[in-house]
Amino acid sequence: MNRNEEYWALVAELGETPPALDGTVERARVRARKARAGRWLGIPAASLAGAASAFILLVNCSMPFAMACRRVPFVRALAEAVAVDPSLKAAFENDYIQPVGQTRTADGVTLSVEYLIVDERQLNVFYTLGWDGENALEAQPALLAQDGEHLEGYAATWGSPGEELQEKDYRVATFYFVEGSLPDRLMLRFDVRDAGYPKAGQGAAESRAAPADGPWPEETPQDRPAAMASFDFPLTIDTGLIGPGRTVRAEQWIELDGQRLRVDGLSIDPTQMVLTLSDDPNNTAWLTGLDCYVADEKGNRYEKGGVSFGSAEGEHFWPNYTLESPYFTGGEAFTLVITGCSWLDKDRTQVTLDLETGEADWLPEGLFVESIERRGEDVYLSLRNDGQGTSFQWYYYDPEGGEHEWGGYSMSAVDRDEDGWCEENTEYRVLRDYGWDSVKLALSTNRRIELETPLEVPLF
């Protein structure tokens, strides 16, 4: 029996309900902890608006769901991996899986690609990674064409080793095809590196002590070390197993916080739903974030995911937001519910800060300059961001127009009333080898609002 036949034989066992599950209707959900963010790959900077957050794969599924898989080790592990994401969990429960079963080993490192969950616009790769060394490993994924050329038009997120992630657990690399569709033949490459901290249970927390000289980053991060190993996996996507997506068109204008936006519609695929908006070029601000969910006529609610992206053409901008998918629940009529949003005002994209006096030409609401200290050629900034409506780009400018990138930054947060919401948030940033007496800080968001009454937009 080959790997594919073995897999489907194991899946068939899931159709036999264990006696312990007979009559069980309760489902308990445990809140999942997120891993640190992944990186963007393959999309030109001009077509990208937003950042992605990566999964951490933890056991976070309903009790019956986990118990139903208890006698099937490989499938059980996959069930635990997908349970953190409702759309992937629904795809798994509907046998929407393509087995791979490829393993590569080099220099003591073993990486196995086991399964795919894939549709026309998203590829989810489930893999394991391990070695005999003491430190954790991380694997950076990339997609190549069959001829070895790097593919463009996609974004990627991937799980990172964490204190709770064991080597036997599945990790997931997710590729979002935001320009075009997924090719049926491609090459998946993983570059494997030492993560720089011990494996789970071997003192990982202690290894991340704060810098001795305070909360600021100790030094400019160096280039990433060379990969310990690089593995290529040829993938053939069975397009006959990909369910067709569908589109719900809206094409209606709405007013949000004094700005005009057009809700273009929803694209619904098995692993995600994408909300597409466009803006009025006469708006005074760009939309940089949207707090929303989609509800259907059955009362189901589809929450926003962790990925946003966009494209621009001239004065027009099309932001896109991923949400949980209604593909397997059969909803037909949808309502978009907006509860908040964030903006970047077109005339407030930078803050000019005098490094000698600490004065700024203006500051977004809730942002305060706590301290400025010059140490040799470096300048240390402490910025308190109580409003949490301000975020910075990854670059800043000197008075002569030169562009510089932040080497890194650190943050602290204080929840004074212990209500789960941090009232004080401070960022510690360093201008490295900076000899000027002023700086222009580029903003990505300068204000955020929460709607007292949610805005409901019917979509049919």
Image: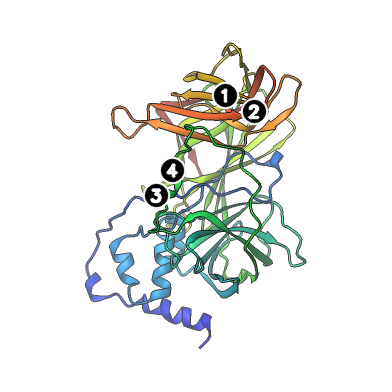
Q: Measured along the vertical axis of the image, is residue 320 above or below residue 4? A: above
Q: Which residue is disc 3 drawn over? A: 33
Whichever of callouts 4 and 3 sits on the residue coming sooner in the sequence is 3
Q: Measured along the vertical axis of the image, is residue 328 above or below residue 432? A: below
Residues under numbered marks 4 and 3 in contact, where contact means CB atoms less than 8 Å apart: no
Mark 1: give few (<14), some (14-19) or many (20+) Cα within 10 Å. some
User: Which structural element holds mark 4?
Assistant: loop
Q: From the viewer's perspective, tell me whether residue 409 is left or right of residue 42.
A: left
Q: Which residue is disc 4 drawn over? A: 209
Q: Measured along the vertical axis of the image, is residue 234 above or below residue 343? A: below
Whichever of callouts 4 and 2 sits on the residue coming sooner in the sequence is 4
The image position of residue 329, as x and y in percent, is: 42, 57
Amino acid tagged 2: Asp
Q: Measured along the vertical axis of the image, is residue 248 above or below residue 417? A: below
Whichever of callouts 4 and 1 sits on the residue coming sooner in the sequence is 4
The image position of residue 89, as x and y in percent, is: 42, 61
C-alpha gap between disc 1 and disc 3: 35 Å
Amino acid tagged 4: Ala
Amino acid tagged 3: Arg
Residues under numbered marks 1 and 3 in contact, where contact means CB atoms less than 8 Å apart: no
Whichever of callouts 1 and 3 sits on the residue coming sooner in the sequence is 3
- Camera-near label (4 vs 2) is 4
Whichever of callouts 3 and 2 sits on the residue coming sooner in the sequence is 3
Residue at 56% of width from left, 25% of height from top?
380
Q: Which residue is disc 2 drawn over? A: 280
